[in-house]
Image (cartoon, rainbow, N blue to C red):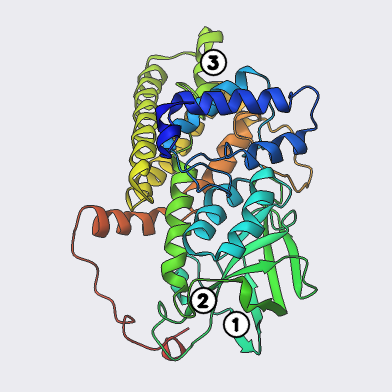
Amino acid sequence: MTDAAHRGGAPDATELRRRTRELLAAHPPLETGRTAFLEARFDAGLAWVHYPEGLGGLGAPRTLQAVVDAELEAAGAPDNDPRRIGIGLGMAAPTILGFGTQEQKERFLRPLWVGEEVWCQLFSEPGAGSDLAALGTRAVREGDDWVVDGQKVWTSSAHLARWAILIARTDPDVPKHRGITYFVCDMTDPGVEVRPLRQITGEAEFNEVFLTGVRIPDSHRLGEVGDGWRVAQTTLMNERVSIGGMRIPREGGMIGPVTKTWRERPELRTHDLHQRLLKLWVEAEVGRLTGERLRQQLVAGQPGPEGSGLKLGFARLNQEISGLEVELLGEEGLLYEDWTMCRPELVDFTGRDAGYRYLRSKGNSIEGGTSEVLLNIVAERVLGLPSEPRTDKDVAWKDLAR
């Protein structure tokens, strides 16, 4: 046993390696079912090591997760398919950890991490996208329940989700940011209707969700009544980091396919395209390293507004790279592999053709906060510039023009 373990402090890298090898010995990956192995990993505190004991972690430094992951990858252990359950991992989990009761944490975090329960996000509305705080979905208290009516839109994975993180208006008589409450919504409630939204790619990865008389027990409220906007900030800041700050290797992500084509197809090269590719390669590498630095900063606490800048750059870069790739391929870049309507489980940028990447990247500057909103956040909260004049700050939501 290590000195850290003797002292009862957080385990160090040596201790984590020992615990990981004990897990592998007790549950050999090739002989243990995938779900059973993931459950055992969670129970051993090796799911996300920086979470508290009993909730999939050991209270260890976040940076030591890489130690566990490397041992498990070398042993051929299954992962929890993080792209499929990204909303749960990147948005719901940190919000539940930060604002949930002990009962909520114990109920939701294990099946969320294992991937038994998929999550979606019921935030944006037809009349409240960029101005999210203007949302109009209502939640009215009836005894121990809240009755919710309204409409949400651009909901990724709603057709797969068991649970949703939801913000709704519980007090229309106060300014818009102060009358919002945050809930966990059961997507199997009979009042929940999910309709596909077909996108420019031909797929229906997004959905619109109609809520009619949906009953949510007060035990599924996160945070205090009327404090939902503050709770939602945790979700939104984590969302932007999870979108723009994913851990990828050098030449991973969107820059990978275009550099591969450049090396394998010299007949496509021109001087102008060469200069543009070099510029974008450098920017992609800067973005990758910036994301790594931001993840290291998370060791000290929750993400801040800096994640908005990372996500802003991610959207612009993806769109420029995909445009260059289509131009590099010439006539081939105009081809599109499949326009069949489908409802995918995840977005696969690098496993598809150039036409898909070009079309799908257009949404990067909208999802997770529009680029225009993120520019305001960076200006005001990162650079400290004066905010734009606002006339709605102290006006009750019910009195706002709509």
The image shows residue 295 at horizontal and vertical percentages of 39, 38
Label 3 vs 2, first from the N-terminus: 2
Q: CA distance from mark 1 to mark 3?
A: 51 Å
Visible residue check, residue 331: no
Visible residue check, residue 31: yes
Point 61% across, 87% down: residue = 140
Tell whether 400 sits left or right of 211.
left
Point 49% across, 26% down: residue = 1
Give the label on residue 181, or none.
2
Helix, strand or loop under label 2: strand
Point 68% across, 20% down: residue = 76
Label 1 vs 3, first from the N-terminus: 1
| Callout 3 amino acid | Lys
The image shows residue 268 at horizontal and vertical percentages of 52, 14
The image shows residue 118 at horizontal and vertical percentages of 69, 52
Give the camera-side residue of 128 and 358: 128
Crowding at mark 3 (Cα within 10 Å: few <14, some 14-19, many 20+):
few
- Give the number of marks: 3
Asked whether disc 1 touches disc 2, contact meaning CB atoms under 8 Å apart, the reply is: yes
User: Which residue in the protein does label 1 denote?
Assistant: 139
Give the camera-side residue of 341 and 6: 6
User: Which residue in the protein does label 3 denote?
Assistant: 260
Q: CA distance from mark 3 to mark 2?
A: 48 Å
Helix, strand or loop under label 1: strand
Tell whether 233 sits left or right of 394.
right
Q: CA distance from mark 1 to mark 2?
A: 8 Å
| Callout 2 amino acid | Thr
The image shows residue 275 at horizontal and vertical percentages of 35, 19
Asked whether disc 1 touches disc 3, contact meaning CB atoms under 8 Å apart, the reply is: no
Point 39% across, 17% down: residue = 274
Give the label on residue 25, or none.
none
